[in-house]
Image (cartoon, rainbow, N blue to C red):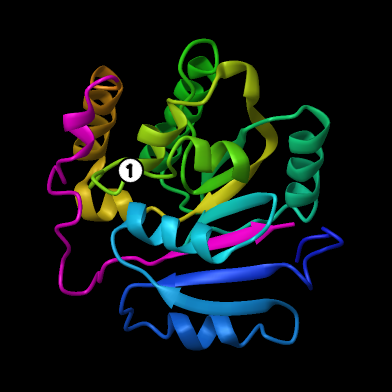
Amino acid sequence: MQDYLHSRPTKVYVADAGSTDRTVEEALSFHDRLDITIIPGGLPSVARNNGARASQSTFILFLDADIELKDPTLIRRAMRAMRGRQLHCATVNIACTSTGLRDRILYSASNLAQHLSTWLRPFGTGMFLLVDRARFEALGGFSELALFAEDYDFTRKISPLRFAIIRGEAHTSNRRFQKTGHLGMTWLFLKTMVNARNPGHFQKSHDYWTTRPEQPLTRRRYYSRG
């Protein structure tokens, strides 16, 4: 649990894309601690925007479905940074819950690339993305033409002076590597960096949403923070 004092009254929107793994039931089981509402999901760019439109808060926190925040201070500190430094967007490093060496190496490389990007064109991962609502709306939210890497497409529009990587980590599974493969994910990441200024790149799925029968399309969660 997070030590953010406003967690209880904050609206939590879970965008569900027809999940079959009891996502809705599991989310609503926290109703005694969180104010949770289920909304329609879909492709990430559409589902994220659905959550943003439903919320009314000054700041919006986007989380992926398989994210675990083990540091109880993370949201509180991120909110303090957003207000104190007048940021438009903040993210964190990503850690993999898997103990596999290749998984950990690739996430470490991704974190390094994210830090280097702050000097010129920010790259923030949608696994944990805290945004200022006013700036989010001014930029038009996530492009609903984006079928791939909608988080990269959005954060590259943020000024490096208003973007920050908060100390700490969000933990995720290695499902992306299981689905696409380590080499496949590395190749997709490199292509995306090279095509950062090419809108057409983000309007292709790159077969990223091709799923195996036992791996249904993952849902996204959208938290709004007041």
Q: Residue furthest right?
A: 5
> For the residue carrying disc 1, how many other residues have a C-alpha within 10 Å: few (<14), some (14-19), or many (20+)?
some
**Can the viewer see residue 131 in this picture?**
no
Q: Is residue 55 left or right of residue 42?
A: right
* Residue 178 drawn at (x, y percent): 27, 54
Q: Which residue is mark 1?
A: 143
Majority secondary structure of magenta residues: loop
Q: Is residue 208 visible?
A: yes
Asked if the stretch drawn in magenta spans residue 206, the answer is yes
User: What is the x, y in percent for residue 24?
Assistant: 47, 83
Type of amino acid at the residue the image marks with label 1: Ser
Horizontal placement of 27 versus 113: left or right? right
Q: Which residues are magenta?
A: 197-226
Kind of element beneath mark 1: loop
- Name above or below for residue 186 compared with residue 72: above
Residue 74 at x, y = what percent? Answer: 74, 48
Q: Nearer the viewer, residue 43 or 111?
A: 43
**Residue lying at 49% horizontally and 34% vertically, measured from the top left:** 124
Q: Residue at x 12, y 48 (%)?
A: 207
**Front residue of this view, candidates 11 and 2:** 11
> Is residue 25 on the magenta stretch?
no
